[in-house]
Image (cartoon, helix red, strand yellow):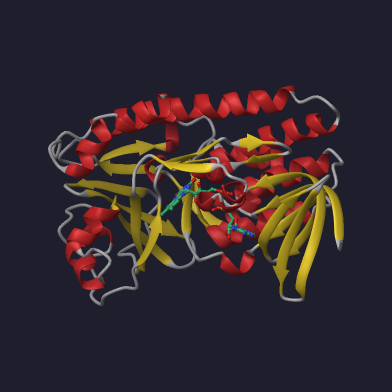
Amino acid sequence: MDYSCAVAIIGSGPAGLSTAIRLSRERVPTILIADTARCVPSAETLPPDAKRELRDLGISEDCLARIGVPCYGFEAKWGKSTPALHSTLVEPYGHGWHIDARLFRRALLGVGESVGVTVIHGRCVGVEKTARWKVTVRTERGVQRISSDFLVDATGRTASIARMLGARLRPLDSMIALVALLKPETPAKTVAVEAVSDGWWYCNPSPCEGTLTGFVTDADLARTLDAANASVWLTLLFQTTFISQRVRHQRESPVVLVRSCASAFLDPLLGDQWLAVGDAAFAVDPLSSYGIIKALAAGRRAAEAIARYLQGDGSLLSSYSRGGAAELREYMSARTRNYLLERQWAAMPFWLRRQASEGFRIASS
Ligand SMILES: Cc1cc2nc3c(=O)[nH]c(=O)nc-3n(C[C@H](O)[C@H](O)[C@H](O)COP(=O)(O)OP(=O)(O)OC[C@H]3O[C@@H](n4cnc5c(N)ncnc54)[C@H](O)[C@@H]3O)c2cc1C
């Protein structure tokens, strides 16, 4: 066995890193498996209240200023004929941030290493439980093996480790985002959102690489529209009245990437000496811009529960599981309320599926 630790965490997104940093601070020997080679360039938005979690983790406002640009709110053409601004001026934490996702994860990884997290760069290809966990990692230097008392699945939407252990990923929809980096008209300081008959569009300013523009719809509707075809995607973009204004000089067909953003939950989200955290446990619609803050907060709760469990008290693991179920119910009813604000296309499949609260019924059962 190459390495031994109390907790092995697989996945170095915000959830895995938040869990690792907090466990290390509690002096719990922790190994994080980081598949950094797969981290794709992306622009994401941090809402103002993410600063609280980040400050607690050791990411200062100065650090955010180095990896992002301020976000002063959302402009949404949603349920109204003209866009409405939801300004962060009224927020107690001030403005949010448009961040470069790769630089953000790198900054968190730096904090992790500084507090003593052992980072192994590679991909976990197998887990097995005997008296302890045995984790197999493929790295550039060959296969490494880790033995641990507790295992954390922080692999994001795939929940690949929990699924190897028999847990089931329960999708609540088949939402995808068809995204491309475009040249912005003028550098924007807000996120733009516009509802359309088959879904919605958004523009997320990126600090380094232009404007991340995405069409969010369901996988079957995207197939019918042929929306992954770059010229079709561009035609659909120019049918919008608000989003298209932000990128109106884009002429050439961009590279369109398809990313899953389906809402889904893991059943169960923990088992014998393992748990799932972040998107692996419960993934949300990107409309909320809530994924990162949710992952950071879940990492905090997971670390507290695991540290206590390793001291012989499993009560916080039960609360972790109950808290996850309550958060899912709350999210599903909030999601239904948000989609009910737009009634223009109430008879169209995309809107009908969300307004009928089907997901809420599934999540409650
Ligand atoms: C199109 C889109 C736009 C979004 N925009 C926003 C936004 O603006 N604001 C926001 O807050 N949220 C946004 N989100 C959501 C946000 O990105 C996620 O909720 C958040 O990253 C979840 O963090 P996580 O750590 O759980 O998972 P992830 O960030 O997905 O991290 C999981 C990590 O595990 C790694 N991994 C997977 N399998 C293995 C393995 N076998 N071995 C080793 N490593 C592995 C992956 O490579 C990855 O690095 C968006 C999501 C999508 C799809």
Q: Residue at x 64, y 63 (%)?
A: 35
Q: Quadrant of the C terminus?
A: top left
Q: Residue at x 87, y 54 (%)?
A: 4
Up/down of 88 relative to 161, above or below: above
Up/down of 1 relative to 347, above or below: below
Pinpoint residue 120: horizontal percent, then vertical percent.
Answer: 76, 62
Left or right of 303, for residue 162: left
Return the residue nearer the eye: 62 or 292: 292
Dividing the picture into quadrants, the one containing residue 233 is: bottom left
Left or right of 94, for residue 57: right
Up/down of 81 relative to 141, above or below: above
Q: Residue at x 18, y 60 (%)?
A: 225
Pinpoint residue 165: horizontal percent, then vertical percent.
Answer: 62, 46
Pinpoint residue 336: horizontal percent, then vertical percent.
Answer: 31, 30
Q: How many numbered marks does the figure carry?
A: 0
Dividing the picture into quadrants, the one containing residue 65 is: bottom right
Left or right of 352, for residue 269: right
Dividing the picture into quadrants, the one containing residue 304 is: top right
Whether residue 59 is visible, yes or no, is no
Up/down of 118 relative to 333, above or below: below
Return the residue nearer the eye: 292 or 187: 292
Whether residue 178 is visible, yes or no, is yes
Q: Quadrant of the N terminus?
A: bottom right
Pinpoint residue 229: horizontal percent, then vertical percent.
Answer: 25, 70
Q: Residue at x 65, y 23 (%)?
A: 319
